[in-house]
Amino acid sequence: MTVPAPNDTTAADGIREAVAGRSEAVGGVVDTLDSLALSLGTTRVSLWDALVLMLVLIALLAGAWLLSKGAHKLLRRIKGLEASQRVLGEKLLSILVWAAAFLVGIDLLGIDLTALAVFSGAFGLAIGFGLQKTFGNLIAGIILLMDKSIKPGDVIAIADQAGQTTFGQIRKIGIRAVSITTRDQKEYLIPNENLMINQVENWSYSSKNVRMQIPVGIGYNCDLDLAEKLMLEAARGVDRVLDTPPPTVWLDGYGDSSVNFVIHCWISDPEGGLGNIRSHVLKNLWHLFKANGIEIPFPQRDINLRNNAQFEQLIAAISQRIEDRKS
């Protein structure tokens, strides 16, 4: 058991003296808890010390959490801040609050930081190896918010594990990852570092206007001008399609079975989905084509059979069999 220096007091000793001075009964309970101790070398840890440590940690965690939430609410009340600036401010406030709580806890518990030199070195080494990705993602998230290249509410194109590209809306930029929700309510958690080092297609970086391309084929015997007019009418009949820029129709080429067109139309709310717009345009076009006699052709092929002796013998045998059946 070590005897502390005259001026060496801890939080547990101060609380024990304060409690003992107010009530002798409670002071007796405290002395009993303090007598239940475990000595490891020159270090003595009693049940009372452990209880005080636990209470201080709980108080600090609860206080830091409440203070962080309160600071976030105050920040949300400030008008004129963009979404990325608000998220960045919340992250910085959280870091400051938890750093202050750590320093206050060190001071309350009377921990000598010089005694933790060896532990600090080992902890720093662990951060360098084990937590490298975590801190890298934290810094990457802060950089993304500072340069405003990606912010909550943006619609970006992503690629899944199979290599298929889809799109989703950014819901949250967290400490470790960005939360992206697709139209089918699948939520992807993408590490912040991936968005820093990989190519990202941001559909709403400088403008939310997105142009869609809808391929359409018609028969060779159809009126091309009438078909083009009906395609524009079908696109304009969808509410989410913008009038400015207006829809356009391009002749894309001559296919094997059809004359191929592409309908170009613009929308300003890509987070609402693209497939439903394409479906509405094609459904409108189906009814317009039916009403105006525009044919949507099936695949057609011309087959040429070369004449030779074996082929002619086969035709003659088939013809002979047909005549025999008739007779």
Image: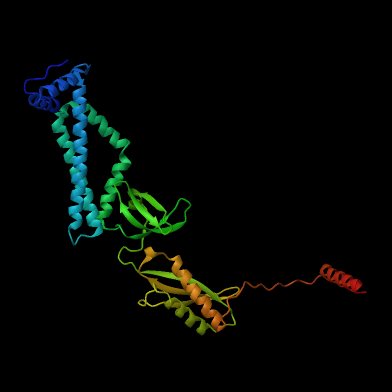
Residue 106 to residue 97: above or below: above
Specify whether residue 116 is in view. no
Residue 131 placed where, x, y %?
31, 38
Where residue 116 appears, as percent x and y from the top left, is 20, 28
Colouring: rainbow
- Residue 16 in the figure: left or right of residue 178: left
- The residue nearer to you, when weighing 318 against 8, is 8
Q: Quadrant of residue 55?
A: top left
Say which quadrant the N terminus sits in: top left
Which corner quadrant holds the C terminus?
bottom right
Residue 264, quarter of picture: bottom left
Q: Is residue 322 above or below residue 100?
A: below
Residue 2 against residue 16 in the figure, above or below:
above
Nearest the viewer among 156 and 180 is: 180
Count every numbered label the image shows and give the total: 0
Q: In this image, 277 relative to 45: left or right?
A: right
How far across and down, in percent of the image, does residue 242 sit?
A: 37, 75
Along the line of sight, the residue nearer the viewer: 79 or 295: 79
Q: Residue at x 81, y 70 (%)?
A: 308
